[in-house]
């Protein structure tokens, strides 16, 4: 007996949901309080620091975040030094020395900011305008900034795009960054934050000058987000597509995101890509057999999420199939113990020094050449590629080229997010 069509569809949806293929659903209503300034974004900006140094532009209040009690005041321009101390936070300035499990730093002025830097761990020196909350972790200090949505978006645009990019390109970036933020709220809940300040989420290094193009792009797009079927889109973006963007299904382990499809990044097949002026758009990388073996031994267990895996010695690499945008869909790795397959964007991180570290492949849009010795055994691997990043959504250098050709931010976004529409979340 043949199952009813509705039952087949229900079973398919259930399988996709279990496998993680159905996209997260984020309603417009959930996002509105952030656009209206009623809720703030929590941003992890420093992690595992041995010391954090804060120099405020105006008076800075040191508070107990549990009771809201004001513990001390840091004078304008004074230096506040924070260090971990036996599982607590030690705060010291010229006039006081406080130790507590958590501390909050609140600017006295409405538009005030603090210059923050650190020693150890990760985090970027910058001017941070929000309320800062500190806690101790097993690795040092953690600093989370609480700030308004568009203050964060302006910082993302300034960090993600060169300041020489045209205004329309930056406006498109601002809309994408705002939408991405609202879609991914809570991704770093384990760190008591919504997002982090690294490219793992979005690059961010504090507040740009108010007269910068990034700040102006954010002001001109205030409240605007991308939506598809009344849901926020996962507004992914990347540096340069190299001629065509990718489809989410191919890159992100079979995710069903119908607005992230492969699109050509040129007016016609005879024209060069809009992102062609990126100096990294064409690249090549070479690894000897020994280098590739060492990198794969370190990274394959992490990529496959099998920390105890011992993959054996590398024998050969084989590109199984190419997906949308000319990107590698599967890479087959033959070793002395087994044959492994790695899919989509995860291929890039197989060749980083330290998982997802430097020297990873710039993109998966590449051709692989295996270099044999006289006996025909592989001794090296060459990757000839194009583009930079995962290839999904907005191509930043493509947005630059499109803006220079006269396209508006709305036209740029329509080109990269198929079927998505602009919505204004403001009341």
Image (cartoon, rainbow, N blue to C red):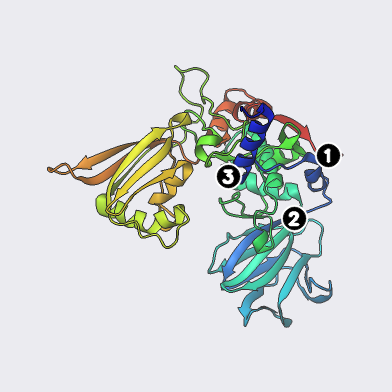
Q: CA distance from mark 1 to mark 3?
A: 35 Å
Q: Residue 400: x percent and y percent?
A: 56, 32
- Determine whether label 1 and label 2 are within 8 Å by CB: no
Q: Which residue is mark 3?
A: 19
Of badges 1 and 3, nearer the viewer stands 3
Binning the other alpha carbons within 10 Å of mark 1 as few (below 14), some (14 to 19) or many (20 upward) gives some
- Judged from the image, the secondary structure of the residue bearing numbered disc 3 is loop
Q: Nearer the viewer, residue 104 or 291?
A: 291
Note whether 48 is above or below 94 in the view shown. Answer: above
Q: Residue 354: x percent and y percent?
A: 42, 58
**Which residue is at 71% across, 45% downward?**
182
- Judged from the image, the secondary structure of the residue bearing numbered disc 1 is loop
Binning the other alpha carbons within 10 Å of mark 3 as few (below 14), some (14 to 19) or many (20 upward) gives few
- Judged from the image, the secondary structure of the residue bearing numbered disc 2 is strand
Q: Residue furthest right?
A: 427
Q: Which residue is mark 2?
A: 147
**Disc ID at residue 52:** none
> Residue 418's image quarter?
top right
Q: Residue 337: x percent and y percent?
A: 30, 54
Q: Which residue is mark 1?
A: 426
Q: CA distance from mark 1 to mark 2?
A: 17 Å
Note whether 36 is above or below 279 in the view shown. Answer: below
**Which residue is at 72% across, 67% downward?**
133
Is tag 3's residue or tag 2's residue first in the polypeptide sequence? 3
Is tag 1's residue or tag 3's residue first in the polypeptide sequence? 3
Q: Nearer the viewer, residue 7 or 135?
A: 7
The reply to whether residue 148 is in sight is: yes
Q: Residue 40: x percent and y percent?
A: 77, 54
């Amino acid at each position: 007996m043949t199952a009813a069509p509705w039952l087949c569809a229900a079973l398919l949806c259930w399988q996709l949901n279990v496998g993680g293929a159905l996209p997260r659903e984020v309603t417009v209503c959930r996002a509105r309080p952030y656009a209206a300034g009623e809720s703030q974004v929590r941003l992890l900006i420093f992690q595992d620091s041995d010391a954090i140094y804060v120099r405020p532009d105006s008076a800075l209040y040191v508070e107990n975040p549990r009771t809201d009690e004001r513990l001390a005041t840091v004078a304008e321009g004074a230096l506040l030094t924070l260090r971990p101390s036996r599982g607590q936070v030690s705060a010291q300035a010229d006039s006081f020395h406080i130790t507590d499990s958590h501390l909050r730093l609140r600017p006295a002025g409405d538009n005030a900011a603090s210059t923050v830097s650190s020693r150890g761990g990760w985090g970027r020196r910058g001017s941070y305008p929000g309320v800062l909350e500190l806690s101790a972790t097993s690795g040092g200090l953690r600093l989370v900034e609480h700030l308004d949505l568009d203050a964060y978006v302006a910082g993302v645009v300034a960090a993600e795009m060169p300041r020489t990019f045209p205004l329309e390109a930056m406006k498109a970036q601002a809309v994408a960054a705002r939408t991405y933020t609202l879609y991914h709220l809570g991704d770093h809940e384990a760190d008591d934050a919504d997002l982090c300040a690294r490219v793992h989420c979005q690059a961010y290094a504090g507040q740009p000058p108010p007269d910068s193009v990034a700040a102006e792009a954010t002001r001109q797009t205030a409240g605007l987000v991308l939506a598809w079927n009344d849901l926020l889109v996962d507004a992914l973006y990347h540096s340069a597509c190299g001629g065509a963007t990718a489809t989410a299904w191919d890159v992100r382990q079979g995710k069903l995101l119908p607005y992230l499809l492969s699109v050509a990044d040129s007016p016609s097949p005879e024209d060069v890509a809009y992102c062609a002026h990126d100096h990294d758009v064409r690249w090549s990388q070479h690894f000897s057999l020994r280098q590739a073996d060492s990198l794969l031994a370190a990274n394959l267990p992490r990529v496959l999420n099998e920390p105890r895996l011992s993959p054996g010695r590398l024998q050969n690499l084989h590109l199984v199939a190419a997906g949308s945008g000319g990107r590698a869909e599967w890479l087959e790795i033959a070793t002395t113990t087994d044959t492994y397959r790695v899919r989509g964007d995860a291929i890039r991180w197989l060749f980083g020094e330290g998982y997802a570290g430097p020297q990873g492949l710039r993109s998966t849009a590449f051709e692989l050449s295996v270099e044999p010795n006289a006996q025909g055994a592989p001794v090296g691997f060459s990757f000839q590629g194009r583009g930079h990043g995962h290839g999904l959504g907005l191509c930043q250098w493509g947005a630059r080229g499109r803006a220079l050709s006269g396209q508006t931010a709305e036209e740029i976004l329509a080109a990269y997010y198929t079927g998505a529409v602009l919505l204004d979340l403001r009341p």
